[in-house]
Amino acid sequence: MEDIKKYQRAEKLKKKREELQTIPYYYDGLERLCDRIHPKKQLLRVSDIKELSHDTKLFRFVSEKPNKPLAPFRAGQYIGLTVEINGVRTSRPYSLVSSPNQLAYYELGIRKKIGGFVSPHLVDNGKVGDIFESTEPMGNLYYNPIFHGKNLVFIAGGCGITPFISFLRDVTEKMVPLNIWLIYGALTEKDILFRNELEDMQSRRNNLKIKYVLSEPESDWTGACGFITKDMISSDIGSINDKYYYIVGNRAMYGFIQQELKTLGIPRHKMYFEAFGVPDDITKVIGWPEEVKSTDKFQVKLKYRKNGREVEEEFEALCVEPLLNCIEKLSKETIIIENGCRSGECALCRTKMISGKVFVPPEVTIRELDKKFGFIHPCVSYPLTNLEIDLTLT
């Protein structure tokens, strides 16, 4: 009898609590906040295009959905921009130039790469009103106050200035107490991007020092010439030991700068190199097997799902083109493999290789478990034999 009375009292208390606090049929928790900060995809519309130089344009994007604001980002990050060119759906990463202190728009500085596939299309054919899909902001090139300290050295080559522009806008707007030395290498004077803005920021902030270095200057150029050497770096920044170094440029520049900084005695953990990207000629990369010629082609057997069922197809891929590019261009169906950096860093394109052998540039790091179980990053993997790829397991 006593147990029955306890049960009745418990039921009364439960009923009273439910009357006082109605439980909603759906509780959102942090889902909307997570989607706001880390959206799986974003739809962007080109609102303005501006010419920065003879081969570079500035694209401004706004959200295509008025009720879907742009995702926040850290200065120095990038987005993967998806395009469709002659039936080929692909994407490329571009650094955000705009300040992270406003989210009304994103800005990207896109340089036309000779022999490129996406950048020439965007620079030559992009127009106001075009709509693109993009990833959320990604990348690890951003300031960490705990590890990076208060003295920062930015070394930029060519279009590698773009993430630094976002960084400098952020620091200048918020008057962040950092000391920054920017050493900017360009081909000629007309290739210096954002020069007016850089000089304006330098004139208003005494904690910013800028130096331009031209490798092919005109006869009337009075500034620094040649390559960014260890002597140039040390003479410009003074003490080298209390600083952190960010380097953004092309592959050839990375190898040269790393050696110069190493000669100065700067440890590797005080340098950050932005994702390398794919080399212009993979056969020139250390480790490429000499017996594989640049004209060699290999069969790629692909397994994927279409309309709920497994499909197999085969195509012939050129060994000097990344496997992801081959899949996008040569497969019969429009196959979407999630990707962001196209440099092997973000691992979004992680894919199961059933059989075969690929070449991966030595600087690309792949997790030991992925190596053990046969997963590759197709964005930086080059076929060296016939391959079998299973996209149903990713």
Image (cartoon, rainbow, N blue to C red):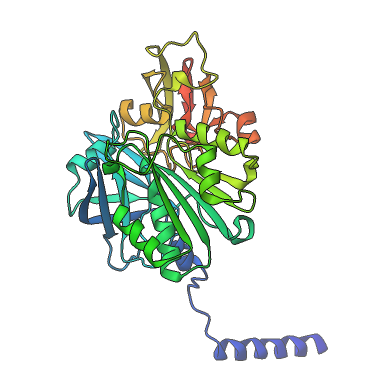
Measured from the top left, where is residue 99 in percent x and y?
38, 62
Residue at x 61% of width, y 91% of height? 16
Tell me if residue 173 comes above or below residue 42 in the rendering.
below
Q: Nearer the viewer, residue 1 or 98?
A: 98
Measured from the top left, where is residue 253 in percent x and y?
46, 34
Residue at x 48% of width, y 27% of height? 381
**Horizontal relation, residue 3 to residue 23: left or right:** right
Residue at x 32% of width, y 25% of height? 330
Which of the 4 image quadrants contains residue 13?
Answer: bottom right
- Residue 81 visible in image: yes
Tell me if residue 375 comes above or below residue 274 in the rendering.
above
Q: Nearer the viewer, residue 98 or 350?
A: 98
Tell me if residue 324 comes above or below residue 271 in the rendering.
above
Q: Nearer the viewer, residue 273 or 315?
A: 273
- Residue 71 visible in image: no
Which of the 4 image quadrants contains residue 87?
Answer: top left
Q: Nearer the viewer, residue 50 or 194?
A: 194
